[in-house]
Image (cartoon, rainbow, N blue to C red):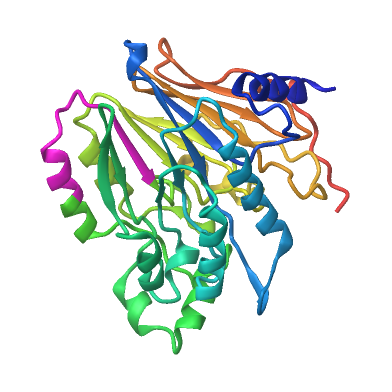
Amino acid sequence: MNHINRSRRHFLQTSGALALGSTLPISLVELAFADEKQNFTFAYISDAHIQQIKGSRFVRNWDRGLIRAVAETNLLNPKPDFVMFGGDLAQLGSVPELDHGAEILSALKYKIRHVMGEHDYYLDLGAYWEKLFGPQYYSFDHKGVHFIVLNSIRTYDDWTYHRWPTAEQRMLEMAGLDNPNSSPFMVGDEQRQWMKKDLDKIPLTTPIVVFSHSPLQKIYKGWNFWTEDAEQIQALLKPFNKVSVIYGHVHQIQYNQIGNISFNSVMATAWPWPYPQAYAQAEQYLPKLTVPMNRSDPFFERDATGWQFINVANGHVDLNYLLPENTDRSVGFDKDAKNPVDKQYQSEGARIPPQSHF
């Protein structure tokens, strides 16, 4: 049994989920304070990409990833206070896809909140998603933490309303990963004004956690790992002592520190994205601290769709990644360096070489 499975078995045993197997495609988040009585956990599931083939037939692998995440979340002990779904429930935003995904999520035994992804939005601009799940952006408070949920995948009005002959074409264009006809994501004026009013009521010492689908950074525009008004959002968060942004969309490990804001990605339940070679041509846009996630086997259907145990201690996020067929990863905030540090995966010589037999 390898180191990953030993670590995973230990966590599951201490969690009371003795019968579970390999990787958990979820994130378990603990917000930790000086007073342990204030600690609580929540689960984070993201990027299911439920895709209809025809009628009642859906892509099985994407289904299984989400079904497994829901089943294993229900077995967690201690029980999470709530569950976040991080966006891209559907692949092409259709009613059958969203209904099917919502049906799978309905098996959760906890309150669930949702973030909107671009694959959920660009067919009908989120109309059916809102009927199922509620507002596209909102905030809430829980045990001393202020949470903000944003729709960060809007774009320019001309692209959205005037460029495409059909809604289906618009959805297909935005769904493409490396598509010159796409358009950069943004939060937009409306939400930024709302966010400012929301934050004006919050003491600066309150821990802030922001959930978005896109990174709220400018990482790589070619793949739309990019939020056009990221700096404006960061400026709104700058006055607060401790801020964490947790996002999906990228299907890979990323972490960064910009001023007082820690940025952390979560992995998908559907598939991993590799790191594009063009990153090297845009190094200044990368999270400077990220050590790339190693993909050990592109033929393994659950490759790099693992889970994270996330601990937010004194306002700083620490992530413990467990990956199938890979070495465990641990990313924690280093108080001396004042940024996240990849504790177990820094050395080139210590990494598992990625297979390339495709």
Dividing the image into 4 quarters, which one contains the N terminus?
Answer: top right
333 is within the stretch colored magenta: no
Q: Tell me residue 126's x, y (percent).
A: 38, 69
Q: Is residue 190 above or below residue 274?
A: below
Q: What stretch is highlighted in magenta?
A: 195-211
- In depth, the one of 263 and 106 nearer the eye is 106
> How many dots with numbers?
0
State whether residue 272 appears in this view.
no
State whether residue 240 appears in this view.
yes
Residue at screen point 41% across, 62% down: 184
- In depth, the one of 30 and 217 nearer the eye is 30
Q: In this view, does 239 lie above or below 101?
A: above
Dividing the image into 4 quarters, which one contains the C terminus?
Answer: bottom right
Q: Tell me residue 76's x, y (percent).
A: 57, 31
319 lies left or right of 11: left
Residue at screen point 63% across, 24% down: 16
Q: Tell me residue 153's x, y (percent).
A: 39, 60
Residue at screen point 45% across, 82% down: 167
200 is within the stretch colored magenta: yes
157 lies left or right of 185: left
191 lies left or right of 19: left
Residue at screen point 32% across, 11% down: 35
Looking at this view, name the residue that lies furthest to the right: 357
